Image (cartoon, rainbow, N blue to C red):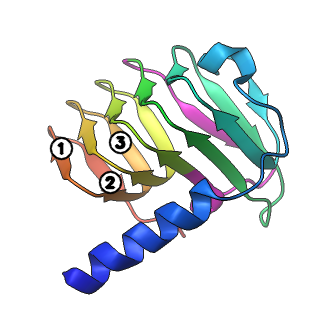
Amino acid sequence: LTTAVSDMETAYADASQRTNTEGSNIGAGNIGGLTLTTGVYTFDVDINIGVDIKFSGDADDVFILQTTGSLMQATSTKVILEGGAQAKNIFWQVAGKVSVGASAVMQGILLAKTSVVFETSSSLTGRVLGQTACTLQKATITQPV
């Protein structure tokens, strides 16, 4: 367990130190409705997904979203992958908490400094790496291919 925690902390630190390539605080943190392309996105505000969001890229493209705040995904919203983009190449580096609403569909690797909560019937294609707690309320998590 100690090794797993250390590896998670290393991955979190690595993601947090990546240089921004796509601008800061796009949409003032409200990224629902956007289509993101490969790159590093930095936020010093909460990231909110209030409507569906798309990630568009090739199979090898990497997306990193860094925030000193929290990540909140609204009920029944979806993270959609286009053009070959893969969940295993999307990294959410979150200093605050992660909250995925009921029936929401999340994709990517969650590197959370604090807690992660998946509400009823939510799902994730990816991995959850939280440093304090992960709460699943009848949620489904599928390992990315």
* Secondary structure of the residue carrying numbered label 2: strand
Please tell me which residue is depicted at 28% across the width and 42% down the height of the picture: 116
Instruction: Please name which of the two marks, 3 or 1, marks the residue nearer to the observer.
Output: 1
Residues at discs 1 and 2 in contact (Cβ within 8 Å): yes
Please state the extent of the stretch shown in magenta in the rendering.
75-91
Q: Earlier in the sequence, mark 1 or mark 2?
A: 1
Residue 118 lies within the magenta run: no
**Amino acid type of the residue tagged 3 in the rendering:** Ser
Instruction: For mark 1, give the secondary structure.
Output: strand
Q: Amino acid at mark 1?
A: Leu
Q: Secondary structure at mark 3?
A: strand
33 and 68: which is toward the camera: 68
Question: As shown in the figure, which amino acid type bears the numbered disc 2?
Answer: Ile
Residue 133 located left or right of residue 75: left
Q: Is residue 76 visible?
A: yes
Relative image position of residue 86 (x, y in whole percent): 66, 57
Note whether residue 87 is visible: no
Report the quarter where the N terminus lies. bottom left
